[in-house]
Image (tube, helix red, strand yellow):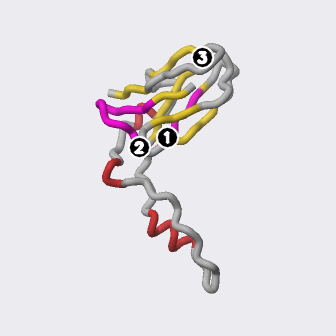
Amino acid sequence: MSGKVTYQGKSVVYGIVSAICADGLTRTVNITEDGTYRFENLPAGSVQLGVTSPEPPDPDDLHRRGERAGAVKSARPKAVDRSKWFSIPDKYADPRTSGQSTTVTPGAITFNIELS
């Protein structure tokens, strides 16, 4: 199952989609910078979805925290364009109360998560 996450018509560019599946297990995937998400191999049946989008970390802070004296400097972590990020209401975080659900069927399905 895959799709795009939007809030009030704007792409959510950072965060996590959580899914409580028909088997009772919770699975999570990251939201990509273009607002899309993709779950692989979800079991068939109903699924409840939640979305969280905490403020992205500052890539400069991540890089500095990872450095040690004398260590070879590694590549910077992939940065999120913080100018495109915005917060979404906490009510969407819990899949049981977010109001977002669908039914997973065999094969690829698209479900866009449109938050308002």
Circle 1: residue type: Ile
**Circle 3 residue:** 104
Q: Amino acid at mark 3?
A: Val
Q: Residue 66, percent across and down? A: 58, 71
Query: Which residue is located at x 36 percent, y 54 percent?
Result: 82
Instruction: Give the answer, above or below, for where 66 lies relative to 19.
Output: below
Task: Name which of mark 3 and mark 1 comes first in the sequence.
Answer: 1
Q: Which residue is mark 2?
A: 13
> In this rendering, would 99 be left or right of 70?
left
Name the residue tied to disc 1: 31
Q: Could you classify mark 1 by the number of other residues whose Cα lies within 10 Å: few (under 14), some (14-19), or many (20 or more)? A: many
What numbered label is drawn on residue 7?
Answer: none
Q: Tell me what residue is drawn at x 55 percent, y 19 percent.
A: 109
Query: Any magenta on residue 18?
Result: yes
Identify which residue, 101 or 73, lies in the foreground: 73
C-alpha gap between disc 3 and disc 1: 19 Å
Magenta span of residues: 4-19
Coordinates of residue 31 in the picture (x, y in percent): 49, 40
Residue 66 highlighted magenta (yes or no) = no
Mark 2 crowd level (few <14, some 14–19, many ≥20, 10 Å Cα): many
Callout 1: helix, strand or loop? strand
